[in-house]
Image (cartoon, rainbow, N blue to C red):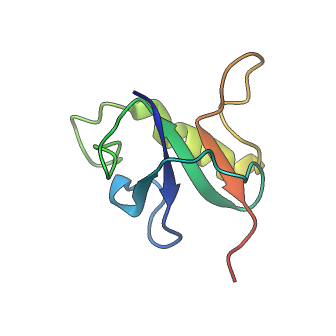
Amino acid sequence: MPNWYAYLGHGDPTFSGNYAITFVKPNCTTGEEVCAIYLNQNTAIPQGFDPLDPNNPFPPMIQYIADALATQVPQPNFPFEKPFVYLRGPVW
C-alpha cells in the first residue's frame, strides 16, 4: 500500500533514514525544501533509495528529489502522473 513519508527536515534528503511514515496527505506542494515523498511501501521508515546502496530499489526517487530541489516544483512533473516528491518553504 502506498504511503507518504515526511522528510524530518535535517540531513541528506536522498537518505531514506531521514523520513518517517505519515498517514495524512501533506499540505505542502512547492518550495525550497523537500517536504514529503510518496512510495509504494508501508514500513515506518522507507526501505532504501539511498544513492550509495547498490541494491537501491527506487533509483528514480533520487532523481525526482534532485529535480524537485532544482526546479522547486513537485516531481515528476509529467501530465497525468502523480508527483512523488512534494516541497515546502524553509523551516525556521
Residue 92 point in image, percent of width and height: 69, 83
Residue under the point 65% across and 26% down: 82
> Outermost residue toward the bottom?
92
Residue under the point 73% across and 22% down: 78
Q: Nearer the viewer, residue 41 or 76?
A: 41
Instruction: Give left or right: position of 78 versus 1.
Output: right
Instruction: Give left or right: position of 53 versus 5.
Output: left
Residue 62 point in image, percent of width and height: 48, 42
60 to 53, vertically: above or below = above
Instruction: Give left or right: position of 24 versus 39.
Output: right
Residue under the point 40% across and 57% down: 20
> Outermost residue toward the front?
23
Residue 72 point in image, percent of width and height: 76, 51
Instruction: Give left or right: position of 29 versus 65.
Output: right
Quadrant in the picture for the N terminus:
top left
State which quadrant residue 85 falls in: top right
> Outermost residue toward the left?
55
27 to 32, vertically: above or below = above
> Outermost residue toward the top?
80
Residue 19 point in image, percent of width and height: 42, 57
Residue under the point 41% across and 29% down: 40
- Number of residue marks: 0
